[in-house]
Amino acid sequence: MASEPIGGDEQSELTPDSWAVWAGRPRNVGEPLNTPIVTASNFTEPSAYARSTGTPTWESFEAVLGGLEGGQAVAFSTGMAAVSAVLDLVPVGGHVAIPSDCYQGVALAVEAGVAAGRWTAGELAVTDTDAWLDALATADLAWLESPTNPLLEIADLATIAAAPRSGLLAVDNTFATPLGQQPLKTGADISVHSVTKFLGGHSDLMMGATVVGDDGLFERLARRRSLGGATPGSLEAFLATRGMRTLPIRMERGQRTASLIAERLADDPRAHGVRYPGLADHPGHELAASQLGGFGAMISFEIVGGAEAADRACRTVRLIHHTTSLGGVESTMERRAAVAGQEHLPAGLLRLSVGIEDPEDLWRDLCQALDG
Ligand SMILES: *Cc1c(COP(=O)(O)O)cnc(C)c1O
């Protein structure tokens, strides 16, 4: 799916699809093909303590991700640990701007900082580019997410990133993945990932990461990891690197199936309000087509019959799992407004994470669930 070569390193002729497979491996004669799960808290000098200096297993993961996004990655224990490290960069009394639709944990963390008197915050529609251009003038941290979770709204990243700003611009790139978009290349300062989702890809680990282009910012985030102590486990880092090896083919399959299902749902009388950036009538479709390498594997849609029908569909799915998380090889579905704090969302909104199962099996399962 991604065909532009990776730039700026000795393997610059590799496309992202090949880089995901090639990068982060031991290269010396006689070494194993895969970096082992190194379980050591201590290394002989001059590399000392793992919490501060890392382990070869995290470094492999960081090499793969950093290369894909054209920067230096710092791996964290979870996506929220990466989010917290970025929020820690905001000076006391500073201002944070976030999208009105974004990952709930980010909104809650920002809200907690406001309640503690740590900073002030504003929520803006991610699609209101002019409002972001204004906010950039005063925000110490402008936090974008695109596509957003769960409404799949699209921000005009290039325009926002090109405007003058007084603070940092971070982009939560979890839904797009590094194959879909590279925030640093559009001019953002920080790209943030929940590795737990598509990068790990198997719902068997929790991890997060930041990627930055600036050395000073890299040092600050690595120091936040060391002092905050939110380091990834070695097993998790190993599994995440293993997951990244198949990210290109998982995403290719997931988004091909997602676009098929989105198109069928859009024509289906049992559904309405289908949100998928690949649909021509999605309000962010043209923007998405110009800035995303693929439309992603997430679909949100409403079901006729509202909350009750949506809950029934969640109880009825057999192949699709009724659960909250996303980005795995297995398809998952959830009624988002049923989650505490998410009642502002349309009551019957279902968020579907499309996995790599057979597309027709998935469609059949969805149909029997829509029929209740
Ligand atoms: C899940 C998620 C996070 C948080 O990541 P965890 O690994 O669960 O801590 C952040 N942003 C988005 C968009 C997510 O989906």
Image: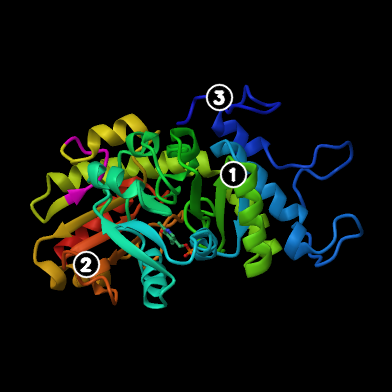
Name the residue nearer the viewer: 155 or 91: 91
Task: Name the residue that disc number 2 marks.
Answer: 313
Asked if residue 154 shows in the view, the reply is no
Q: Main secondary structure of the magenta part?
A: loop
SS for dot 1: helix
**Total numbered labels:** 3
Residue at the spot x=36%, y=33% of the render?
A: 291
| Residue kind at label 1, given as amino acid type | Leu
Name the residue nearer the viewer: 259 or 48: 48
Q: Where is residue 338 in the image (x, y as percent from the top left)?
A: 25, 74
Q: In this view, does 99 lie to the left or right of 178?
A: left
Quadrant in the rendering for residue 327: bottom left
Residue at the spot x=46%, y=45% of the render?
A: 177
The Cα–Cα distance between marks 3 and 2, rounded to whole angstroms, is: 43 Å
SS for dot 3: loop
Which quarter holds ligand 1? Answer: bottom left
Task: Name the residue that disc number 3 marks.
Answer: 5
Q: Which mark is residue 65?
A: 1
| Mark toward the start of the polypeptide (3 vs 2) | 3
